[in-house]
Amino acid sequence: SVCTQLRMERLNVLICVLDLETETLGRSHPEVGYTLLKRGELHLEMLHVDMAIKDTRDAVEILTKGLGKIHPDVGLALMGLADIYNYHTGQYGYEDNKNTALSLYQEALTPLRESFGMVNPYLGLALNSIGILYSGRDDSKHAMKSFYEALAGYGVRSKAKHEEVQVAGDNGQSSRPDVFFVWINVGGLHMARKEWQLALRSYLKAQSAFRCLDGEQQLHLQKIGPRQLMRHALSSTKGRSSFQDNETH
């Protein structure tokens, strides 16, 4: 098909760029790492999951050595690698892949905090991902902790666990679709624990977050089926980094 042909052409270009960068800059230069990330994304588009993992892992290693462990692009690259293990590795080795994804999301937390601060959408997204993975393990304690930390990452402040929360009104974080999704996840976890009052409160918070969205965002969320909410919560932030051109579902 035309799409396949275009992807192959892009792949050939990236291979040539990598050869040139490696020859002129050296294999350990950060520019090589960024190009590997692009090639990894292209491999993922072509469903070459193993090659996408290899390129992204190599990129993380190069960027870490060249830029330092707390550089923002290191954190974002770790997030991208975690997403591959979380969503694109299929049923083979399912549990191991989920464990790897969890470790990578956790590893990404430090550079995301150090680079962007305690309130930033990348941190919230990583923590929400961690919470969902803990939920899949039936570890409700750590899942709930991660979800509330995710809300804090989006600018939602709470005085104590399960107490009434106050959304920070001066930073615009309450208008993010991600906040709606995290509250949905919190409510679902309370439902699973038969904590009906807390579940109701969480869903009301989700409703409030929904009302903060603009019309286009609300329309988009209404088109998402309930079974997709948990997954979509992980991927609702677009353009997470300078080297990510589009969102992968």
Image (cartoon, rainbow, N blue to C red):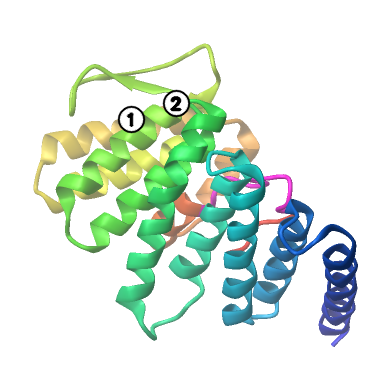
Q: CA distance from mark 2 to mark 1?
A: 22 Å
Residue at the spot 42% in from the left edge and 30% down from the top edge: 153
Dot 1: element:
helix
Which of the two labelled residues, at mark 2 and mark 1, occupies the earlier sequence position?
A: 2
The answer to which of 239 and 98 lies nearer the viewer is 98
Q: Which residue is mark 1?
A: 205
| Magenta segment | 235-244
Dot 2: element:
loop
Outermost residue toward the top in this view = 170
Q: Nearer the viewer, mark 2 or mark 1?
A: 2
Tell me whether circle 2 and circle 1 mark residues in contact (CB < 8 Å).
no
Where is residue 26 drawn, in percent x and y?
80, 61
| Quarter-of-image position of residue 41 | bottom right
- What secondary structure predominates along the stretch shown in magenta? loop
Residue at the spot 33% in from the left edge and 75% down from the top edge: 96
Where is residue 119 drawn, in percent x and y?
47, 26
Numbered mark located on residue 103 in the image: none
- Dot 2 amino acid type: Met
| Quarter-of-image position of residue 237 | top right
Residue at the spot 53% in from the left edge and 44% down from the top edge: 69
Q: Residues within 10 Å of mark 1 (few under 14, many from 20)?
A: many
Check residue 232 for magenta coloring.
no
- Is the residue 248 above or below the residue 199 in the image? below
Where is residue 2 drawn, in percent x and y?
88, 83
- Dot 1 amino acid type: Lys
- Is the residue 18 above or below the residue 9 in the image? above
Residue at the spot 58% in from the left edge and 59% down from the top edge: 61
So how many labels did they put on this image?
2
Where is residue 38 drawn, in percent x and y?
74, 63
Q: Is residue 212 visible?
A: no
The answer to which of 29 and 70 lies nearer the viewer is 29
